[in-house]
Image (cartoon, rainbow, N blue to C red):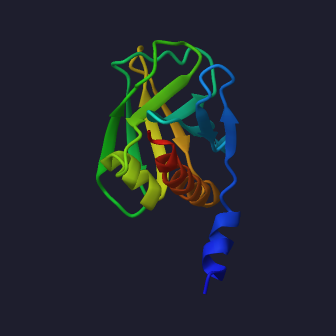
Amino acid sequence: MLLPFFGRAQDCKLTRETDPYTRETKLSTGFIFVDGGSVTIDADSKEIDLLFSIEGADKCFDNNSTAFIFFDGVKTKLTARNGGSMNCEGLFHFIYKNTPSPNTILQKIMTQKITKIVFTGNNKKETTLNFGSTEQQTVVAQATCLVNEAKTLIK
């Protein structure tokens, strides 16, 4: 009866670190590599951060930069803004508050496969990260695992 639970739990490989100064626990999925960059999902007691690292030069993003998220089998797209600071290193953040019930976009990322994300930077140039079927499954599984585990960090 418990076999499916343990089987699923083994797929959940998160990195757990404790900050030596604040004694706060942080969780991370580690990097998930996709066509055009990578994504890592981190969490602490306050927030969940999806960090996209986009390959290539001159990838500048600020708080006005947007990302269009396309899901498998769905015609509509979701729009998200960069939650991180201005940078020209190709780093784009989706930051959500760590709550017992996840934000709508975070919930969709946990339940539906992403086919691509189109990022628009400061120069209005679009950059696309494409997710293959393996990456789609990995992102859904890791996001679900991390968000569920992050709930235990809420104080």
Instruction: Please determine whether, in this image, residue 30 is positioned above or below residue 11.
Output: above
Q: Which residue is more in the foreground, 44 or 28?
A: 44
Residue sitting farthest toward the bottom: 1
Q: Residue at x 37, y 44 (%)?
A: 99
Q: Position of residue 120 (x, y in %)?
A: 41, 26
Q: Which residue is more in the foreground, 145 or 73?
A: 145
- 41 vs 116, left or right, is right
Q: Position of residue 135 (x, y in %)?
A: 62, 54
Q: Position of residue 32 (x, y in %)?
A: 66, 44
Q: Residue at x 34, y 52 (%)?
A: 101
- 77 vs 55, left or right, is left
Q: Residue at x 35, y 35 (%)?
A: 80
Q: How many marks?
A: 0
For residue 150, say whether it is visible: yes
For residue 39, say whether it is visible: no
* The C terminus - image quarter: top left
Q: Position of residue 140 (x, y in %)?
A: 53, 57
